[in-house]
Image (tube, rainbow, N blue to C red):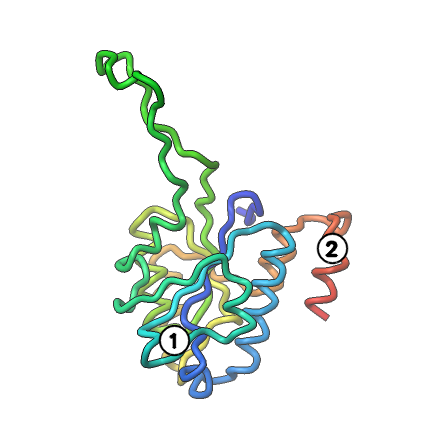
Amino acid sequence: MLLDVLESQLVLVDYQERLMPAIHEAAFVQANALRLAKAARLLEVPVWGTEQVPEKLGHNLPELRALCQRTLAKHHFGAVSDGLAGWLRPPVRQPSGNARSLPKHLQKAPQPAAPERPSIVVAGCEAHVCLLQTALELLDEEFDVWVVTDACGSRTERNRDAAFDRLAGAGAELVTTEMVLFEWMRTAQHPAFRDIQALIK
């Protein structure tokens, strides 16, 4: 199964100013998160951010925060507990006019206002805490979850790798930044190919 750009959303978890200096290979992780976010914007993939108690840990890195449509301030480690799933699902359109006065069997069910984007590409820090719990909650919400391993970090490699093992066992797809970008494009004929190729180089 390949990622479909029209069904994808990107969630960037807690790349916070006071947290990143403690993350193993932080510069590498940040660079890949930035590549993902820039490519997502080029390809019109919605980009969302989360921040864990930003009043204590600071905001996400400014260059990443600027690429997010919205950023969720959270207090739970898993962002779904603070409302992320509501952002990822299209709003439901209620019937208009006097349709509600019809008998129930004649009423149309409420319809989503926009097409579903059930494939959630997620990356962030710390991999074994907020990223892990957010991804597991998204799986519980029946989203397809794709974890971008080279854009995730923890303070130690052991914790990061343990998170990946657990996520794979729970049904998340483990991918890399380049896998995501090339699957979103599918062909070198894509209009954004040169721009995205420049992000990779």
User: Which residue is drawn at the image coordinates 56% and 48% (left, top)?
Assistant: 2
| 176 and 131: which is toward the camera | 131
Q: Is residue 99 left or right of residue 26?
A: left
Q: Position of residue 201 (x, y in %)?
A: 73, 71
Q: Which residue is mark 2?
A: 193
**Image quadrant assignment for residue 28:** bottom right
Q: Is residue 199 left or right of residue 144?
A: right
Q: What's under tag 1, amino acid-wise?
A: Glu
Q: Which residue is mark 1?
A: 126
Q: What's under tag 2, amino acid-wise?
A: Phe
Q: Secondary structure at mark 1?
A: loop
Q: Position of residue 191 (x, y in %)?
A: 75, 49
Q: Are marks 2 and 1 in contact (CB under 8 Å)?
A: no
| CA neighbours of label 2 inside 10 A, class few (<14), some (14 to 19), many (20+) | some
Tell me how far mark 2 sits from mark 1, CA to CA.
31 Å
| Residue 24 drawn above or below residue 6 | below
User: Which residue is drawn at the image coordinates 58% and 71% (left, top)?
Assistant: 32
| 82 and 122: which is toward the camera | 82
User: Which residue is drawn at the image coordinates 52% and 84% (left, top)?
Assistant: 25
